Structure formats: C-alpha cells, structure tokens
Image: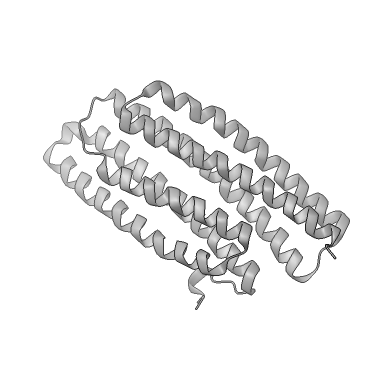
Amino acid sequence: MERQVDTQIEELKKHILSMGGHVEKALDIVIQALIEKNVERFKDVHTIEEQINGDHIKVDDACLQFMAKQGPKARDLRLIFSMVKINADLERMGDQCVNIAFTGKDFLSRGGSYSLQVIEEMSVIVRQMVKESLDSFVKEDSELAKKILLMDDEVDTRKSAVFRDLSAEIKKNPSQVEACLDLILIARNLERLGDHATNIAEDVIFVSTGKDIRHGGKFS
C-alpha cells in the first residue's frame, strides 16, 4: 500500500526535476548565444533565472512543510535533507549561467576571435552531468551518480587547458588580456556548474546508501 508520504515525496521530486529543466535550458541558451555570437540571446537567461529563483523558494517551503507536518524518520529524512541541498545547488547553477551571460556579452563586445572549441566541449560534458545527476536523483540510482563523479575530472582537465593556453596568450599579447580573462571566467563558471552536479550525485549516493562521500569519502 502506497504511503501518503511517498506521494508527497514524488511531488517534491517533480518540483526538483522541473527546476533542473530550467537550469539545463539556461545552460543551453547561454552557450548557444556565445557560440553563435548572439548577444540578444543572453537576455533569455535572465528570464529563466527568475523562474529558477521562484522554484528555489517553492521547493524550500515545500520541504520545510513536509518536515514540520510529517516528522520523517531515517531514509525519508535523508531524502528531504538532500532535496534541500540539491535545491540550493540548482539555484547556484542558475547564478552560474547568468555569470556566463554577463561575461559572454563582455567577451563578444571585445571582438575576440579565439576558438571556443574547448569551452563548447566543457559545456557538453557539464550539460550531461546536470541531466544525469537529476536522473540519478529521481531514480535514486547510486551507480549512475558514481559515473557523474568521474565525469567531473573531464571538466577539470579541459578547464586547466583553457587556463594554460590563455595564460600563455596573455603573455604573448598583453593587449588581449581582457578577452582572455573573459574566457577563463567562463571556463571557471562551467567548472562550478560541474561541481554542483557532482554535489547532487554525492547527495544521491548518501540517500541511496547512507554513505557520506564528501571530503574524500569512498563510494566503492
């Protein structure tokens, strides 16, 4: 027999998933605008961020109401606690997309002609991490969550390549320092998006197994 608590938890999951969908859309738009050099498109990200912020408040309120009225225990409590954390990570992801929009607009205004290939590669991996972290959360799939932790290394490797290449470019062409710093900041924000997806994966593992793998804890 299905518990009323289970129904409420499923509704909360739907709210989280909807918020995650907005984050995915914001990321898609901001990278597309950058690659296509479409400055006007960046404005759409700000509209989506407002939706994300609204979702953030609604999910937090719903989680607090659930804890106050249901008095969850053991696994249910772990799940609700993780939802509050995931909600915060998704809100920060929205902020990161806005950061990329602001910096991307500055970069395009400088008329730089740098290759965006590695930035685009980073965004593809991060997009997959966001999507699969949310999938693992909805399914409470710790094995899928573990794969996301490994994908974070791919993002870090590409971010390091961007930092290395553009630092060398700044030394050769000091006049291009601002454009180079713009791309470094964009790479940094993509890395942070990946970090937040990793946080979600860690929370899924915590809910599913009871193991806290933050700060070097093992998940195997």
The quarter of the picture where residue 36 lies is top left
Viewed as shown, does residue 191 lie left or right of 20? Answer: left
Q: Is residue 192 visible?
A: no
Viewed as shown, does residue 155 lie left or right of 17? Answer: left
Q: Residue 67: where, in percent of width, then height?
A: 81, 57
Q: Residue furthest right?
A: 69
Q: Residue furthest top?
A: 40
The residue drawn where x is 75% and y is 56% is 9
Report the front residue among 171 and 165. Answer: 165
Q: Residue 94: where, in percent of width, then height?
A: 53, 40
Number of labelled discs? 0
The residue drawn where x is 44% and y is 33% is 29
Q: Is residue 148 visible?
A: yes
Give the answer, above or below, for where 12 lies relative to 102. Answer: below
The residue drawn where x is 49% and y is 30% is 45
The residue drawn where x is 40% and y is 59% is 152
